[in-house]
Image: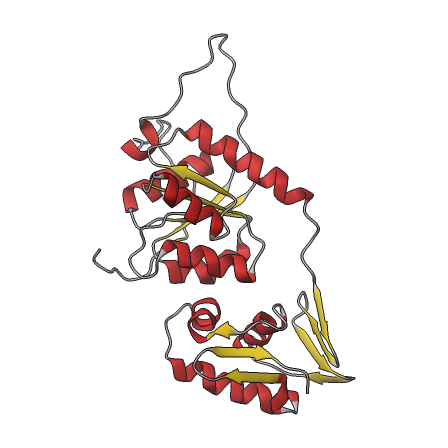
Amino acid sequence: MTQTSAQALLDTRPPTAPAVPAVPRAVQEREPAATGNGATVAMPSGRRVLVVDADAACADSLVTQLRRHGHEALGVRRGADALRAHEDADLVLLDLELPDLDGLEVCRTLRAVSRVPVIIVTARASELDCVLGLQAGADDYVAKPYGLRELMARIEAVMRRAEWQPAAAREIRHGRLHIDVGSREVLVGDEEVALTRKEFDLLCLLASHPGTVIARKQLLQQVWGDSWSRRTVDTHVSSLRGKLGDSGWIVTVRGVGFMLGSP
């Protein structure tokens, strides 16, 4: 697939035309008929939904439909853009055919660092593809072509399950290290440590997985969107070690990546 420059569809203005826009084949063919008694199917509303799909026509149509049903929908074309934008989303609709990263790898990375629900929406319709998607951390798997009502019902079901889960930790404590995720403050003992945005994101990612080695590639994808060099990670790790006051806070696992230490 030919790579294109990253695009984020930020226009939240509602459509001006009263008619419903043409729905691509991926959505259209399995749209169920209206119920016989004339009742309408209730649609979920009010979610911040990130649509990740390289197919511009399909993504634009889905974003429009989601907005018509009360969602705040945003579309991106690349996996790297999804890794940067997911923090502001309540739900991610993820296609697997992306121009820069494999969709399953994007799903694994999201699941490693975030609790945001992910529904894979893709043309890969085999049982094996579905199994791989769920094993990668997806909460549900929808094959194209799909019905809009079916997708909305699946969104509602996934969000219901997510709301029953306990809230993600807002504070991380590891020995003398204390990270307040909400205020983005870091303390070592009683001393506050001033970090840049990327330094904080890097430290928070490592501290969220104590005892786990995080690969360089995953660090680049999650913190920088895979748009920087390997040297970028080394530079920020060196800076973090200096600011934390002990190189033992971040351990290098040669040939693999980094993990949080206990100096």
Residue at the extreme right: 190
Residue 76 at x, y = what percent? Answer: 38, 53
Relative to 134, say whether 78 is above or below. Answer: below
Relative to 154, say whether 50 is above or below. Answer: below
Residue at the image position 51 percent from the left and 18 percent from the top: 40
Residue at the image position 37 percent from the left and 72 percent from the top: 227
Residues 45 and 241: in front is 241
The quarter of the image holding the C terminus is: bottom right
Residue 104 at x, y = what percent? Answer: 40, 54
Q: Is residue 255 left or right of residue 183?
A: left
Relative to 5, say whether 16 is above or below. Answer: above
Q: Is residue 57 left or right of residue 92?
A: left
Residue at the image position 47 percent from the left and 46 percent from the top: 134
What color scheme is it? secondary structure
Q: Is residue 197 left or right of residue 30?
A: right
Q: Is residue 151 left or right of residue 77?
A: right
The quarter of the image holding the N terminus is: bottom left
Q: Is residue 24 visible?
A: no
Q: In terms of image quadrants, where is residue 208?
A: bottom right
Residue 173 at x, y = what percent? Answer: 73, 72
Residue at the extreme top: 37
Residues 152 and 139: in front is 139
